[in-house]
Image: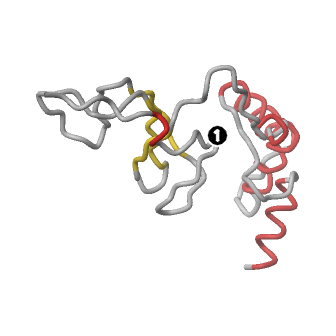
C-alpha cells in the first residue's frame, strides 16, 4: 500500500528568486522541479514512489543543504527585486577596475568596459542584497572597515 503524496500545504511557501538557506543564511540556491512521487536528490530511491508531492527542491549554493518548497500558485505573480538591482556595464567596469587595483599591469577603462559588456552578454549580474548600488562605494567601505 502506498501513501498518497504530501499535500502542497505541508510545504513552506515559495521563497522567491533569492532564497535564504536555513542552515548557513547564504542568499543563493539552485532550484530543481520535482514531480509527485519523485525522490529528492539527497534521498535513496526505493521500490515505491516517494510520498512527497509536486514541489521545488532548493540546494544551498554554499553549504549544500537541501529543502523543499511549494510551487508558485497558478496565476500568482512573485514580486522580484532583481530587475531593479541589476548591475550596469559602467558599474561592472568600475568594479573590475577596483578589483584589479594593485596589480602590476593596470586595467584601462576601455578594457574594463569591454570585459563588462562581454560578461553581461553571458551572465546576469545583480547587486548583493543590502549593498549600495555603486560597486566602488562598496569596495571603499570594505577597505575602510578592514
Q: Which residue is mark 1?
A: 16
Q: Quadrant of residue 104?
A: bottom right
Residue 130 found in image quarter: bottom right
Q: Is residue 97 above or below residue 50?
A: below
- Asked whether, in this view, residue 49 is left or right of residue 72, the answer is left
Q: Dividing the image into 4 quarters, which one contains the N terminus?
A: top left
Q: Position of residue 29 (x, y in %)?
A: 52, 44
The answer to whether residue 28 is above or below residue 54 is below
Q: Where is residue 24? Give x, y as percent.
A: 50, 63
Asked whether 121 or 124 is in front, the reply is: 124
Q: Please provide percent x and percent y for residue 99.
A: 73, 56
Q: x and y percent of residue 46 in the render? A: 14, 33
- Residue shown at the point (82%, 54%) measured from the top left: 135
- Tell whether 52 sits left or right of 24: left
Colouring of the image: secondary structure
- Label 1: which secondary element: loop
For residue 80, what is the image quadrant?
Answer: top right
| Foreground of the two, 6 or 19 | 6
Amino acid at each position: 500500500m502506498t501513501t498518497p503524496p504530501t499535500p502542497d500545504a505541508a510545504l513552506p511557501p515559495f521563497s522567491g528568486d533569492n532564497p535564504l538557506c536555513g542552515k548557513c543564511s547564504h542568499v543563493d540556491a539552485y532550484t530543481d522541479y520535482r514531480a509527485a512521487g519523485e525522490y529528492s536528490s539527497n534521498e535513496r530511491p526505493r521500490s515505491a514512489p516517494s510520498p512527497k508531492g509536486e514541489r521545488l527542491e532548493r540546494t544551498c549554493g554554499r553549504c549544500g543543504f537541501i529543502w523543499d518548497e511549494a510551487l508558485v500558485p497558478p496565476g500568482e505573480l512573485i514580486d522580484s527585486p532583481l530587475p531593479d538591482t541589476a548591475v550596469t556595464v559602467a558599474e561592472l567596469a568600475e568594479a573590475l577596475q577596483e578589483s584589479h587595483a594593485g596589480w602590476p599591469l593596470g586595467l584601462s577603462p576601455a578594457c574594463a568596459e569591454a570585459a563588462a559588456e562581454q560578461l553581461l552578454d553571458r551572465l546576469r549580474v545583480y547587486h548583493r542584497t543590502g549593498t549600495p548600488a555603486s560597486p566602488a562605494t562598496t569596495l571603499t567601505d570594505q577597505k575602510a572597515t578592514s
